[in-house]
Amino acid sequence: MWRGATLILPLGIGAAVYGFAFGVLAAQVGFPAWGVGLMSVGVFAGSSQIAAVDQFAANGAVAGAVVAGMALNLRYLGIMASLSEVLRATPLMKKLVAVHITADENWALTMSEHARDPSVDADFLIGSGLMVVAMWTGSTVLGAWIGAGVPDLSGYGIGFAFTAAFIAMARGLWRGRHDLLPFASSFAATAILVRFEVEGAFAILGGAAAGVIVSGAMRLAAAWRADNALERPL
């Protein structure tokens, strides 16, 4: 656990900068510092927290915040599946703790270390996760505390931290040119839905669905071509 907590520090600092920006903007739409801290510990998902605060600021719709959070965190189904080997011998309660505190940062580090050293297990994941939780929560509370006492920081471009974080997340998912069409389809569908004033949370779902459909169609087409190639006489 200690090894995980120390190795995650550089990535944790990046999350803390992002968390500070979130805390500032959350405070400026009415969230108290204690509420921001409680959300950071209880939800511990930066993208979902941003979406929730955005929904609350726009119209106070809890349902929209929940839908947006679910859509943004669908990737964790794949993330947790990829950790099955790391968590295989872990007791259920410990496994549930690990699931809650798994973020993009400590997942990536754990997978990288496990590939080099198969003895890396749930303790490493939990240690690194606890460090990220501490840095994320501390930075969001600090941002909320400062943001509550400053009239308006939007003019300083702090909100771009969220855009930058999502760009970095998308870049991390990019695997090559074959991803171009699903990425473009998802972007186009989301842009069209937003243009027609569809609720942001549902625009996210629509964009995700478009990307999945296009990706599935590409896989089916590739499988069909492979089958036809096998059936051709030599």
Image (cartoon, helix red, strand yellow):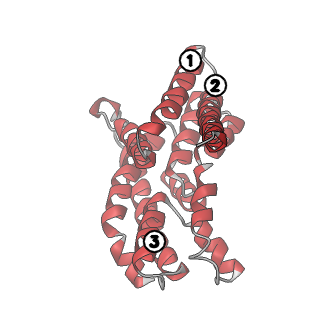
User: At which x and y percent is residue 108?
Assistant: 44, 63
- Bin the neighbour count of mark 3 within 10 Å (Cα to Cα): few under 14, some 14-19, many 20 and up: many
Residues at discs 3 and 2 in contact (Cβ within 8 Å): no
- Per the image, the residue denoted by label 2 is 199
Q: Residue at x 59, y 30 (%)?
A: 207
- Per the image, the residue denoted by label 1 is 192
Q: Considering the image in quadrants, where does the N terminus appear?
A: bottom left
User: At which x and y percent is residue 188?
Assistant: 52, 22
Name the kind of residue labelled 2 in the image.
Answer: Glu
Disc 3 or disc 2, which is closer to the eye?
Answer: 3
Q: Is residue 158 left or right of residue 79?
A: left
Q: Residue at x 72, y 37 (%)?
A: 63
Q: Is residue 17 visible?
A: yes
For residue 138, which quarter of the picture? bottom left
Q: Is residue 76 above or below residue 113?
A: above
Q: Which mark is residue 136?
A: none
Q: Which mark is residue 110?
A: 3
Q: SS class of the residue under badge 3? A: helix
Name the kind of residue labelled 3 in the image.
Answer: Thr
Q: Is residue 28 visible?
A: no
Q: Nearer the viewer, residue 229 or 158?
A: 229
Q: SS class of the residue under badge 2? A: loop
Q: Residue furthest top?
A: 196
